[in-house]
Image (tube, rainbow, N blue to C red):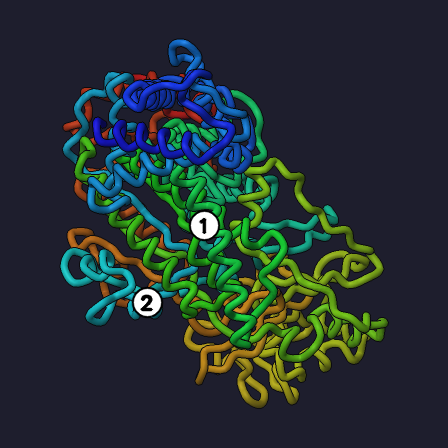
């Protein structure tokens, strides 16, 4: 504290010497000793105000959009500095408002840098601040000693495939040193295989809520309502979570003493931050931005994130220019708002999620699931194995190390499980490779006019909608004419629907209405296969040159269109075919097994969403004291099976007992088991009272059966 005070005082002296609108002397001038004393008083007053007033300011502004709050950090700091200068006797401290913003920012930055230098690594100083902040909140709450049974943290590294993680943790100087050390000592690495829809919406809903039934893609069109469902839109995420809870009959993986951070869905947790399915709610029970207060209430953290945010914007601009000047291929446009979206994902969202996770562990919560989206966002635009992503992997490794070190201060031991929801497959976009979009090809097959200039396809990256939600921007709803086919893209998976035909259109009807359409699509070199429904043969996969695979009977005509897509492809496609909202035509791009490349129907050179390559092979990195994911060593297939594995791990070593369901899909008082292990039984009444007053009730829980309503259960 003394060192930071001294550096802050010196910083004030230097700034007063170089800035014309900032002074620390009286009008008639002062001696150097007097000026130095004035600087020390100003620095001390600024430090005290930052410690005492800053948390109150942030709490008062909690309803302000989170991204806007991050940008207001500098102006709030400047206001505090003006107030601090006003407290100096005899009016010796004066500054113009715009100059005060600069002075406050420089002082906060130098203070943070000084703390980091004294702690050797800035991450270490950052961790200590987070621990102190959470510790103060815990003491104010009067928390009892934690249970001896272990808690479990599930940390999702969004979009990081199994093979790439293995490469990043091998060699003499691995990109992810902490994870590499875990692999060599305490953890075991297991791959798993996604469903056909290899994207966060389907995977995370299955993992957190036990069902991703009827999620054919990242976005799809529902004929009965005429609405577009997009997994990362707040209203869509809330509806998808409601449907999953209705199907399974329970609140989710985190329904007991859980926290959900940075996810699309809550998992039934009562503690949420940056969760898309609750972002559209308003009211006293919506605490989706509570994590922002926990982080921005500390001015050092706020300044660190704000400075890193702008540094990341400049880094992206520099990397994009280097890619263009070096004529690297493949590449996509990275202008517009993308630098801001990237900075939000790699800095703001990462820092808030990490701080929330540290707070959850220090609060002793039983189960925490958090998603770090940084790698996925950058890999979409730079490529899965590009040098731009290496820096992101290193920063994620530091975040993992910070969380692991903070867990040592927790009131209970923690088992940390790393996992991903999907991987990413590289490749030139369909538009760049063939000069037209999937929608243009569909229109040509239907005999409709094709625009001479192909428009741009919006990226489906998760961070884009998270940033829009943080800004309170309205959702973008795309209008569609019922007389035109609706063509949607989810990575290298395309969906074609005909709104003017109710129900799912059969192959025979498609051939009658548009005789050239299926042949145009199936024989295009950029398309691997189509899924259609035949009135005669059931589910049929179509390939080039008349190749067919009848999924109901297993009959193959010609070369099997699914052969190149590996083991389990037929099962994945067959499962999707039975979904009520599967598109009339499901289109999967071509896949080259030799290079692992696909062709995204969006503007992404690292993509996921369909079949083909690394996108369908995420990972589990689990502590060796847990039971193997699949006891017989067989394949781990589908997000729903991963959910069952994570539930089993939560129950091991007397962990939290999750709610049991009845066949009707509702909870009954006699069948809801909500006990901690015996070591935590003494806290049950206090925890229940706290839940009753503060919890966010997950959808699907009747009020009379929700655990917080009866403190004696």
Mark 1 crowdedness (10 Å alpha carbons): few <14, some 14-19, many ≥20: few
* Residue picked out by circle 2: 635
Mark 1–mark 2 CB contact (< 8 Å) = no
Viewed as shown, does residue 7 lie left or right of 75?
A: left
Instruction: Mark yes or no: residue 713 visible.
Output: no
Secondary element at image label 1: helix
What is the residue that sits farthest to the top in this orientation?
Answer: 90
Q: Position of residue 580 (x, y in %)?
A: 62, 55
- Whole-percent x, y for residue 205 in the image: 47, 48
Between 75 and 106, the one lying in front of the other is 106
Quadrant, the N terminus: top left
The picture places residue 232, in percent across and down from the top left corner, at 56, 48
For the question of whether residue 455 can be seen, the reply is yes
Q: Nearer the viewer, residue 24 or 439?
A: 24
Quadrant, the C terminus: top left
Q: Quadrant of residue 153?
A: top left
Q: From mark 1 to mark 2, how far is it between C-alphas?
A: 43 Å
Residue at left offset 29%, top offset 54%: 397
Left or right: residue 151 compared with residue 25: left
Label 2: state its secondary structure.
Answer: loop
Position of 369 with respect to 703 (left or right) is left
139 or 22: nearer the viewer: 22
Say which residue appears at 36% left-offset and 19% top-offset. Answer: 30
- Above or below, 142 against 181 in this view is above
Left or right position of 115 against 592: left
Q: Which mark is residue 538?
A: none
Q: What number of labels is visible? A: 2
The crowd level at tag 2 (other Cα within 10 Å; few <14, some 14-19, many 20+) is few
- Marked residue nearer the N-terminal end (1 or 2): 1
Q: Residue 155 location, x and y as percent? A: 33, 48
Name the residue carrying label 1: 311
User: Which residue is rendered at x = 52% and y = 32% of the image?
Assistant: 72
């Amino acid at each position: 504290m003394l060192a930071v005070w001294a550096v802050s005082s010196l910083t004030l002296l230097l700034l007063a010497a170089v800035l014309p609108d900032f002074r620390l002397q009286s009008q008639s001038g002062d001696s150097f000793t007097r000026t130095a004393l004035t600087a020390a008083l100003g620095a001390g007053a600024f430090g005290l105000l930052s410690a005492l007033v800053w948390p109150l300011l942030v709490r008062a502004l909690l309803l302000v959009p989170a991204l806007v709050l991050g940008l207001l950090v500098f102006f709030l700091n400047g206001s505090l500095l003006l107030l601090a200068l006003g407290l100096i006797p005899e009016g010796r401290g004066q500054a113009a408002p715009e100059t005060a913003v600069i002075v406050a920012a420089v002082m906060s930055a130098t203070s943070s840098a000084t703390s980091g230098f004294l702690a050797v690594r800035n991450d270490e100083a950052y961790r200590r601040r987070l621990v102190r902040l959470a510790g103060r909140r815990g003491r104010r709450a009067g928390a009892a000693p934690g249970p001896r049974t272990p808690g479990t943290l599930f940390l999702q590294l969004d979009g990081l495939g199994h093979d790439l993680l293995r490469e990043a943790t091998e060699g003499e100087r691995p990109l992810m040193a902490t994870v590499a050390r875990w692999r060599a000592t305490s953890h075991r690495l297991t791959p798993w295989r996604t469903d056909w829809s290899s994207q966060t919406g389907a995977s995370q809903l299955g993992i957190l809520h036990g069902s991703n039934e009827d999620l054919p893609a990242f976005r799809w069109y529902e004929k009965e309502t005429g609405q577009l469902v997009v997994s990362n839109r707040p209203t869509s995420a809330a509806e998808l979570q409601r449907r999953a809870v209705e199907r399974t009959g329970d609140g989710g993986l985190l329904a007991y003493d859980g926290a959900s951070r940075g996810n699309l869905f809550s998992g039934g947790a009562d503690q949420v931050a940056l969760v898309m399915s609750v972002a559209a709610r308003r009211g006293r029970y919506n605490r989706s931005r509570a994590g922002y207060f926990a982080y921005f209430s500390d001015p050092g953290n706020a300044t660190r994130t704000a400075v890193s945010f702008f540094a990341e914007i400049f880094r992206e601009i520099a990397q994009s220019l280097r890619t263009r000047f070096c004529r690297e291929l493949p590449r996509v446009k990275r202008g517009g708002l993308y630098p801001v979206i990237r900075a939000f994902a790699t800095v703001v969202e990462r820092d808030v999620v990490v701080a929330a996770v540290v707070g959850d562990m220090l609060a002793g919560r039983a189960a925490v699931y958090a998603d770090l989206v940084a790698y996925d966002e950058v890999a979409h635009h730079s490529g899965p194995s590009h040098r731009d992503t290496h820096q992101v992997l290193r920063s994620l490794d530091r975040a993992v190390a910070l969380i692991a070190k903070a867990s040592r201060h927790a009131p209970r031991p923690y088992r940390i499980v790393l996992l991903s929801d999907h991987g990413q497959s590289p490749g030139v976009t369909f538009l760049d490779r063939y000069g037209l979009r999937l929608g243009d090809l569909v229109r040509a097959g239907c005999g409709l006019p094709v625009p001479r200039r192909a428009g741009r396809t919006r990226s489906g990256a998760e961070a884009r909608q998270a940033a829009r939600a943080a800004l309170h921007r309205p959702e973008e709803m795309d209008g569609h004419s019922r007389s035109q086919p609706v063509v949607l893209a989810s990575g290298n998976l395309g969906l074609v629907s005909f709104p003017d035909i109710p129900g799912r259109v059969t192959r025979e009807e498609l051939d009658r209405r548009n005789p050239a359409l299926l042949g145009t699509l199936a024989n295009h070199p950029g398309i691997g296969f189509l899924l259609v429904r035949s009135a005669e043969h059931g589910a049929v996969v179509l390939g080039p040159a008349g190749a067919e695979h009848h999924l109901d009977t297993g009959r193959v005509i010609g070369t099997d269109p699914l052969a190149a897509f590996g083991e389990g492809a037929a099962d994945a496609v067959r499962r999707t075919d039975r979904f009520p909202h599967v598109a009339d035509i499901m289109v999967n791009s071509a896949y080259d097994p030799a290079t692992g490349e696909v062709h995204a129907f969006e503007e992404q050179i690292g993509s996921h969403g369909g079949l083909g390559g690394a996108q369908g092979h995420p990972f589990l990195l689990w502590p060796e004291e847990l039971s193997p994911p699949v006891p017989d060593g067989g394949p781990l297939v589908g997000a729903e099976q991963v959910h069952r594995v994570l539930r089993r791990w939560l129950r091991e070593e007397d962990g939290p007992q999750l709610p049991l369901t009845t066949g009707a899909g509702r909870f009954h008082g006699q069948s809801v088991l909500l006990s901690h292990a015996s070591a935590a039984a003494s806290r049950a009444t206090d925890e229940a009272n706290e839940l009753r007053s503060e919890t966010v009730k997950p959808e699907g829980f009747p009020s009379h059966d929700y655990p917080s309503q009866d403190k004696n259960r």
